[in-house]
């Protein structure tokens, strides 16, 4: 069975989100991925960008706004944080980290390796249901998930030593009321863990291996994943997808492989 850890060097948010969806679509085993983006705001699948970030400020400062294919609220990406992703094929054997459909159980089950790693590194963190990882001082990571009949993805963004004023500046939602079908971000206190990325990645991988009963091989995306990511890239660079109404907009080009 495929069991691997991927550390991605690419920092372009559109390319990274293309690969994220591609791995979800093509994954045939267990994949743990770590990746970081240049400064950007990543909004959830069912959000309206103009209500979740300051688009004028983002444009003036060269901050990309990109929609991911998973649900949830807007998050800041940039210097001082890292994204983590767990992909699991339905048939994969991973002991206590097996396939499950219920979103709350996905967050409970797949946050566990991160929580154990954080505690080993001296960070007093816990899961605040359904999908927030918090310390006594504030939120350090949010999570989002996607599940299909073939597998699941659980991913999140962990704050290490980000500029928290910058984080707040671009992720504070407007107070305007919207229809319930649009997901709204929560205006909440965020804090850094103060961790170094290398030690976090190493500890997370080791804890994950222990929890899953697997040995993860250091790997790169497969050829199929790379090809699918290439086809998806036009979607994640399309303003219609990123900034439009998620219930009306359909990205053009050949990249419309999202579900």
Image: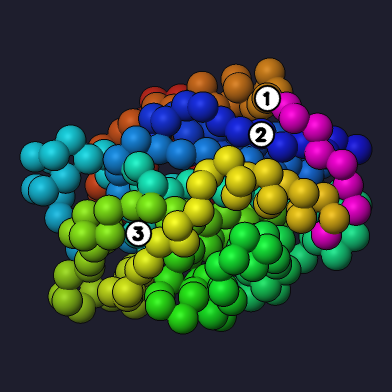
Counting residues from the N terminus, which is met first, the one under dot 3 or under dot 2? 2
Alpha carbon of mark 1 to alpha carbon of mark 3: how far? 28 Å
Secondary structure beneath dot 3 equals: loop
In percent of width and height, residue 12 lies at 39, 30
In percent of width and height, residue 245 lies at 28, 54
* Image color mode: rainbow
Tell me which residue sits at (22%, 40%) in the image.
Answer: 63
Residue tagged 3: 74
In the foreground, 240 or 144: 144
Q: How many marks?
A: 3
Looking at the image, can residue 154 be seen? yes
Residue 147: quadrant of the picture: bottom right
Residue 220: assigned label: 1
Q: Residues within 10 Å of mark 2 (few under 14, many from 20)?
A: some
Q: Is residue 202 left or right of residue 98?
A: left
Q: Residue furthest front?
A: 122
The stretch in magenta equals: 211-219
Q: Is residue 128 left or right of residue 3?
A: left
Q: Is residue 244 above or below residue 118?
A: above
């Amino acid at each position: 069975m495929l069991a691997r850890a991927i550390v991605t060097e690419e920092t372009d948010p559109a390319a990274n989100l293309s690969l994220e969806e591609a791995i979800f679509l093509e994954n045939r085993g267990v994949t743990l991925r770590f990746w970081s983006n240049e400064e950007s705001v990543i909004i959830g699948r069912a959000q309206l960008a103009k209500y979740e970030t300051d688009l004028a400020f983002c444009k003036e400062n060269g901050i990309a706004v990109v929609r991911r294919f998973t649900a949830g609220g807007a998050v800041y990406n940039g210097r001082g944080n890292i994204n983590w992703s767990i992909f699991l094929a339905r048939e994969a054997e991973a002991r206590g980290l097996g396939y499950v459909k219920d979103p709350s159980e996905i967050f409970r089950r797949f946050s566990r390796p991160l929580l154990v790693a954080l505690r080993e590194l001296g960070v007093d963190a816990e899961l605040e249901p359904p999908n927030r990882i918090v310390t006594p001082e504030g939120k350090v990571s949010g999570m989002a998930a996607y599940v299909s009949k073939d597998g699941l993805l659980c991913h999140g963004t962990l704050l290490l030593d980000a500029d928290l004023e910058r984080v707040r500046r671009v992720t504070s939602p407007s107070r305007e009321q919207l229809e319930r079908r649009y997901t709204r971000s929560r205006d909440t206190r965020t804090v850094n863990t103060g961790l170094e990325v290398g030690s976090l990645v190493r500890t997370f991988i080791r804890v994950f291996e222990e929890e899953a009963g697997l040995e993860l091989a250091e790997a790169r995306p497969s050829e199929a994943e790379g090809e699918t990511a290439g086809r998806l890239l036009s979607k994640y660079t399309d303003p219609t997808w990123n900034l439009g109404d998620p219930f009306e907009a359909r990205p053009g080009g050949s990249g419309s492989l999202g579900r």
